[in-house]
Amino acid sequence: MLIRELDIPEDIIRFYEDSGIKELYPPQAEAVDRGLLERKNLLAAIPTASGKTLLAELAMLKAIRNGGKALYIVPLRALASEKFDRFRELAPFGIKVGISTGDFDSRDEWLGANDIIVATSEKTDSLLRNGTSWMEEVNTIVVDEVHLLDSKNRGPTLEVTITKLMRLNPDCQIIALSATVGNAREMADWLDAELVLSEWRPTDLHEGIFFGEAINFLGKQKKIERRDKDNATNLVLDTLNEGGQCLVFESSRRNCTGFAKTASKKVGKLLDPDVRGKLAQMADEVESTGETDTAKVLANCIRNGVAFHHAGLNSSHRKTVEDGFRQNLIKVISSTPTLAAGLNLPARRVIIRNYRRFDSNFGMQPIPVLEYKQMAGRAGRPHLDPYGESVLLAKEYAEFEQLLENYVEADAEDIWSKLGTENALRTHVLSTIVNGFASDRAELMEFMGATFFAFQQDTWSLEDVIDDCIEFLTDNDMIVKNETPESTSLSSTQLGKLVSMLYIDPMSGAKIVDGLKKATNVTDLTLLHLICSTPDMRQLYMRSGDYVKINDFVMSHSDDFIEIPNQFKQTDYEWFLGEVKTAMLLDEWISEISADEITQHFNVGEGDIHALADTAEWLMHATTKLAELVGVKYSSYARGLEKRIHYGASPELMELVGIRGVGRVRARKLYKAGFVSLAELKKADYSILSKLVGPNVAANILSNIGVRVKKQVDKSTPIYSNTLDTLLDKDQKTFSDFQ
């Protein structure tokens, strides 16, 4: 089927033809035949790189041209940014694109001016909770990676969000995109959608197992030259010799980094001087923008054309690695499976070096087939590679046979709803009542009857769990329950509305309110531990050497904790120590301990510090709002901590860190040099500032606080004028965030 044959405007047809897309792939053509452009719901369960995004674009563009608005839901912020950048290419058609992934208590009404809004499932849920008006105008909804309904963390939110959107906009077209799953027909039936189910790929995928000095594919073998004692390294070198790139999936961050270091010693020898020069610049940038030893290790790997990628890296370094790979400068990425979850980074060969993952309850366990298929699906760059190869590694013949049966020849598992527990349902029961989707128990059960859980199982199996949620919310003053012989009416209280709008677990809200009421001696540690005791905070893992050290810390800071559990209740006390460990990290962060020291103290990555700080800032913001509502005296204290967590700095630096381009490290340098406030900084001599923070940074800082810095005479020295630029452009971001 040709693009030109589609029922879409001529200028859009030319756009795709000019970009090289003149004919649809078979799954895309089938989607059109099944009503994609006729506003029919559709589930496309097709492999990676087989054209899912184009399906979404065609449906969205046609709807927008007819006066509609589209919402594109993704699971990850990184994927949201990727899709946002792609959809901005539609700007020549007058298409406005917005993105929203944070600020969970905001309506983001400004987004309503856009034609396409890209958001994570959590952000979409929060927009619904906050009553965002433009949500009712959306008439095309795209749900990317819809198989994540099976995720115990993200699945319940995605499921309830889809259910609410179908209830809010019953005439809306839903386009669900997924990897191939076992029960795609069941998912399509739930969505009342046409199903496109296909294994077709634009680049052939060969799935094999390395065993006996060769990759064993179905029906053929490929011998691999032995150049190193490590089989995965030999596979990498073979790929590079053929002109391809490699993704290597590892089971842990440590293994991921270790393999990158090992492989880089061999890969570096294969690079030409031009590539080496560009990699050196990239490595220097990584090293100069990192605060930890990990950044130095990553930089050294990049110099040799190899990188590692995991959540312990900060976001800028992860993006550098991704961009370097897309530019074919970085030849090999050693990654944890997070890279397989949606990001568009295909490679000639995917090597799954370890198919087992650590489970805290059961130890090392084999990964699901669906996860394997996600990783294997990254093999083969469309229009660049003649084929793609995914390779598992076997040490003995019995393992070879097992991998062949359980992965290469296996079908992906069925997707099952994870909505059936109180932990998963509690927050969604509250939001359903707050938003008016249900005003009594019968309506609540009716709403839950529209979920995927109820589609797979009888709704009555949710009744006991829902009643437990209602009881909890009633006991904690978040809803009011009035029982009559005819019905049980349910309405939200001010506290319930606030908890829902803040986008926190009602259990977190209850813990925070209870803690604020009990607190008598409030310090930084008091409030930090309070938020770390909530289910919304991911706690740090307790290692064997932590118990004595953290217990001693608790004993020496006993007055700072609202409540300390009985040490003889072992499970409760161990959980408490994990909360304290997490609070200790945050305390070091706001005390300006260097990121390098924090990573060493707590055995975490720089990315983990920022992730924990982001969550802590959100929970401290919630604490501020809850303190104001219940009338306790700690709201201003919490507000100050919220800002300190954001910047990772002490109270005296708050004025300086609010200036764009300063940051906590530079702020401390400026403060020690006597520039303790904005007023002092405005009077600063440029030459002194340039010695402290460098000439370019000094010029930028002065410009950002309204001090005019004239055009540079040479590349290093600006002509400085200590004159306030009072006529700053309204769009120029200066220190307005601080003000």
Image (spheres, grey):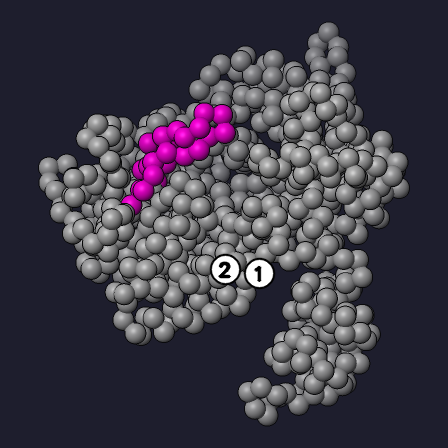
Q: Amino acid at mark 2?
A: Ala
Residue 720 placement, left or right of 204: right
Residue 669, position as x, y percentages in the image: 71, 70
Write the residue at 50% across / 56% down: 294
For the residues bearing labels 2 and 1, Cβ distance under 8 angstroms? yes
1 is higher (above) or lower (below) than 164: below
Element type where label 1 sits in the image: loop
Residue 702, position as x, y percentages in the image: 70, 78
Q: Amino acid at mark 1?
A: Glu
Residue 46 occupies quadrant: top left
Magenta-colored span: 351-374
- Name the residue at the bottom extreme: 713
Write the residue at 62% across / 40% down: 126
- Determine the CA span between mark 2 and mark 1: 7 Å
Write the residue at 50% across / 48% down: 311
Residue occupied by mark 1: 291
- Foreground pick, 303 / 105: 303
Residue occupied by mark 2: 295
Residue 327 occupies quadrant: bottom left
